[in-house]
Structures are given as C-alpha cells and as structure tokens.
Amino acid sequence: MQPKVIVFSTPTCSHCNNAKRYFRENKIRFTDVDVSRDMKAAQDMQRRTGQTGVPVILINNRPIVGFDRAKINRLLNI
C-alpha cells in the first residue's frame, strides 16, 4: 500500500522541486501544496511542525523538514 505523501512547497524553492522530482522518479504519488498561494495550508504546516520554511514533507503524517533523502527513503522503505 502506498503511503500518504504531502509536500508543502513553493514554486521557486529548488529543494522543493528536487523533492517532487525525486518522488516522480520513484513513482511515489504525492499531493503538492503550494503554501505561497494557500495561507491556510501554510498555517497548518506551521502548526504541525513549527516550521515556516519549505519543503516540509509529510509521509503518513510524519514530518520531514527539508529534502532529507535518507529519511524519506527510510519512511518509504526504499
């Protein structure tokens, strides 16, 4: 079963774009949430993680701050 993956990002964030590319290359479905356009999502991200910077990635509601490939791989078992 595929884990639930959410990427809180902005269009100009290179680390966000690298993370999304990594998910696409590994055929991991994800939901991209643009916090520069969705203030409620930005507030939700900050409430969940205490972070205001992106990317913040949630894998089955477990937060990863930044594009931490090792942690992503561990949570996705890849």
Image (cartoon, grey):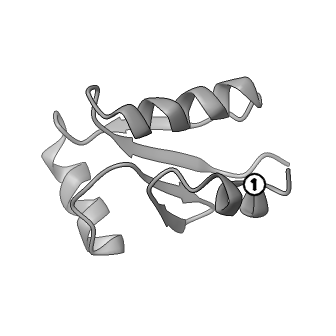
Would you place residue 24 above or below residue 75 in this image? above
Residue at image location 29% in from the left, 26% down from the top? 11
Q: Which residue is mark 1?
A: 73
Question: How crowded is the residue under tag 1: few (<14 C-alpha within 10 Å), some, or many (20+)?
Answer: few
Q: Percent position (x, y) of residue 30?
A: 58, 37
Residue beneath the point at 27% across and 35% down:
10
Q: Amino acid at mark 1?
A: Asn
Where is residue 66 shown, x and y percent of the image? 44, 55
Which quarter of the picture shows residue 24?
top right
**Would you say 8 lies left or right of 68 here?**
left
State the residue at coordinates (66%, 63%).
71
Q: Is residue 33 above or below residue 5?
A: above
The foreground one among 23 and 14 is 14
Q: Is residue 47 above or below residue 40?
A: below
21 in relation to 72, above or below: above
* Location of residue 57 in the rendering, given as x and y in whole percent from the top left corner: 49, 54
User: As drawn, is 30 to the left or to the right of 43?
Assistant: right
For numbered disc 1, what is the local secondary structure? helix
Task: Please give left or right for residue 71 compared with residue 33 in the image.
Answer: right
Task: Please tell me which residue is depicted at 57% across the width and 56% down the height of the picture.
Answer: 68
Rendered location of residue 58, percent (x, y): 52, 58
Image side of residue 15 versus residue 26, left or right = left
The image shows a total of numbered marks equal to 1
